[in-house]
Image (cartoon, helix red, strand yellow):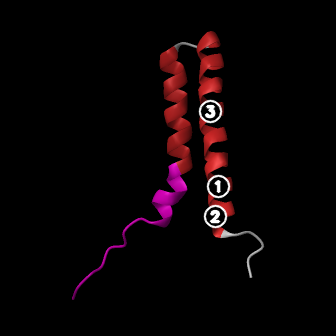
Amino acid sequence: MNRFSDAALAHAGLLMAMVIWASSLIALKLAFRVYDPVVVIFGRMIVGSACFLPLLLRFKPRKQYRP
C-alpha cells in the first residue's frame, strides 16, 4: 500500500511545479540585470532543448520496413 494518498501526491507535485515556475521568473529577472535579454532567452532555449533531447531519442518513431 502507498504511504501517501493520491491526493497528497498530486498536491505535492503541484506545489513543486509552482516553486519551480516562480524560481525561474526570479532567475530571469536577475539574469536580465547582467546579460542582454536575447542572450538570456537563447540560453533558456538551449537548456530546454537539452532537457528534451533524451525524450526525443527515447520516443523517436522507429521505421518499419515492409517486404
Picture coordinates of residue 5, whole percent (x, y): 69, 69
Residue 12 versus residue 59 in the image, above or below: above
**Disc 3 vs disc 2: Cβ atoms closer than 8 Å?**
no
Q: In the rendered image, which residue does mark 3 sit on? A: 22
- Between the C-alphas of marks 1 and 3, the distance is 16 Å
Residue located farthest toward the right when viewing the structure as drawn: 3
Query: Dot 1: what SS?
Result: helix
State which tag comes first along the sequence, 1 or 3. Answer: 1
Residue located farthest toward the bottom when viewing the structure as drawn: 67
Residue 11 badge: 1
| Residue 62: quadrant of the picture | bottom left
Indicate which label's residue lies in the foreground, 1 or 3: 1
- Between the C-alphas of marks 1 and 2, the distance is 6 Å
Estimate how packed mark 1 is, as few (under 14), some (14 to 19) or many (20 or more) residues with alpha carbons within 10 Å: few
Q: Which residues are magenta?
A: 52-67
Q: In the rendered image, which residue does mark 2 sit on? A: 7
Query: Dot 2: what SS?
Result: helix
